[in-house]
Image (cartoon, helix red, strand yellow):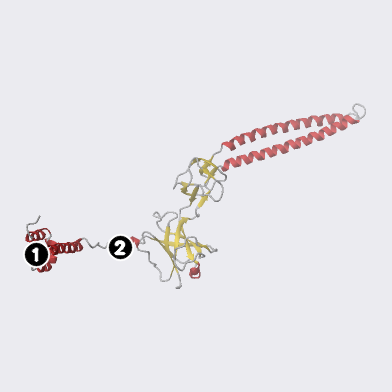
């Protein structure tokens, strides 16, 4: 404990001198009232509390204002009149959803994310056991029908030979007219059996070819030269051929990259084909990319991603245009959003 008020003040001056210098005028004023304060200790406690509060406010009570990060600042338009929109980076072939031709279990996956593939390279394979068994059955069936056809042809030749020798004999002398007629009918029947065997063989061969095609379809290959963007399935998973399910593999050609820009229908009249444009990273407006016009879609579709603008209604429609991204695009990824400014000839 402190021996006296004077001792307390000395301790305060010793440990808090840097802060007390700022309050020196107030301290001198307080010292003039020391005789009075010695008689009223409650006032002393109140003064200590006020003094502590003032010191805290001058030192740590105010949080320093951090400098604003330039990376969070939005990009500014490089043109006087501009049409702004959000761009989505995509492959120049558009993003291709590689679907399964039929439902089944994934047996093997031959690629990985980011792998470059050529047209015809195997992407993944579905379980082929049932179709391989069916293929073997079809082949055996075709062999049986080939033997049946060969037997029918041999039988036809035998009956034709018998008929030819019988016709050389005089009818009614060496052979009766009834037997001759029966042999003629037997030849006609044998011809019909040969035609039936040929038809059965053709049908079996067609089924064999169909099975081979279905078996080949279980091995899914790349339709174009490109890059595997995303693998959405794993070995042993069941994939379906219905449209309401996500495709097992997403791929596309990434050289060069394109950006698909949505323009509000109200700005459509200000857009001119071939006008220059510039894209900026949303996370770093210092990184920009020059754009080259490729095409514009003729159909204005409903806007699916609403921005929340008070002027925007749920039936807002947009026009999509496609630009090529020029320069070094190693920092960009498929599906990334960009802030895009397209040069316009006049203000809205």
The answer to whether residue 271 is seen in the rendering is no
Q: Is residue 109 above or below residue 278?
A: above
User: With 49 as the anchor, is 307 left or right in this view?
Assistant: right
As drawn, which residue projects farthest toward the right? 172
Residue at (86, 31) in percent of width and height: 182
Which element is circle 2 on?
loop
Residue at (45, 44) in percent of width and height: 112
For the residue pair 40 and 248, the one nearer the viewer reads as: 40
Q: Is residue 134 above or below residue 343?
A: above
Labels 1 & 2 near each other (Cβ < 8 A): no
Image coordinates of residue 5 in percent, x first then y, are 8, 61
> Mark number for residue 87?
none
- Number of residues whose C-alpha sits closer than 10 Å to that of mark 1, classed few (under 14), some (14–19) or many (20 or more): few
User: With 15 as the anchor, is 234 left or right in this view?
Assistant: right
Mark 1 or 2, closer to the camera: 1
Image coordinates of residue 153 in percent, x first then y, are 75, 32
Q: Quadrant of the N terminus?
A: bottom left
Nearest to N terminus: mark 1 or mark 2: 1
- Asked which quadrant contains residue 289, the reply is bottom left
The answer to whether residue 89 is seen in the rendering is yes
User: With 20 as the anchor, is 214 left or right in this view?
Assistant: right
- Number of residues whose C-alpha sits closer than 10 Å to that of mark 2, classed few (under 14), some (14–19) or many (20 or more): few
Residue at (57, 41) in percent of width and height: 216
Which element is circle 1 on?
helix
Residue on which disc 1 sits? 39
The residues tagged by marks 1 and 2 sit, at their Cα atoms, a distance apart of 53 Å
Residue on which disc 2 sits? 68
User: With 287 as the anchor, is 17 left or right in this view?
Assistant: left
Image coordinates of residue 60 in percent, x first then y, are 21, 60
Image coordinates of residue 198 in percent, x first then y, are 72, 37
């Amino acid at each position: 404990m402190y021996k006296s008020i004077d001792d307390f003040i000395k301790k305060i001056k010793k440990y808090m001198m840097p802060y007390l210098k700022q309050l020196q005028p107030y301290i001198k004023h307080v010292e003039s009232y020391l005789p009075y304060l010695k008689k009223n200790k409650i006032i002393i406690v109140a003064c200590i509390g006020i003094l502590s509060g003032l010191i805290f406010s001058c030192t740590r009570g105010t949080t320093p204002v951090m400098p604003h990060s330039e990376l969070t600042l939005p990009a500014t338009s490089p043109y006087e009149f501009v049409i702004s929109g959000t761009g989505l980076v995509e492959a120049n072939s558009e993003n291709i959803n590689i679907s399964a031709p039929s439902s089944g279990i994934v047996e093997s996956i031959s690629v990985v994310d980011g792998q470059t593939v050529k047209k015809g390279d195997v992407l993944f394979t579905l379980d082929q056991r049932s179709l391989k068994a069916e293929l073997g059955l079809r082949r055996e069936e075709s062999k049986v029908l080939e033997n049946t056809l060969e037997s029918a042809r041999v039988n036809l030749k035998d009956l034709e030979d018998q008929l030819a020798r019988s016709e050389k004999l005089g009818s009614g002398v060496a052979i009766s007219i009834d037997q001759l007629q029966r042999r003629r009918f037997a030849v006609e029947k044998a011809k019909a059996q040969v035609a039936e065997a040929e038809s059965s063989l053709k049908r079996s061969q067609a089924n064999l070819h169909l099975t081979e095609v279905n078996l080949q379809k279980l091995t899914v290959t790349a339709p174009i030269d490109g890059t595997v963007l995303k693998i959405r399935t794993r070995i042993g998973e069941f994939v379906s051929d219905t449209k309401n399910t996500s495709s097992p593999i997403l791929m596309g050609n990434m050289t060069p990259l394109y950006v698909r820009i949505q323009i509000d229908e109200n700005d459509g009249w200000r857009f001119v084909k071939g006008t220059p444009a510039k894209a900026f990273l949303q996370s770093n407006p210092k990184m920009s990319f020059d754009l080259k016009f490729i095409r514009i879609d003729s159909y204005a579709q409903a806007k699916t991603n609403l921005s929340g603008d008070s002027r925007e209604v749920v039936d807002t429609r947009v026009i999509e245009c496609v630009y090529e991204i020029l320069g070094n695009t190693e920092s960009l990824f498929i599906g990334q959003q960009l802030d895009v400014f397209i040069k316009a000839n006049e203000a809205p």
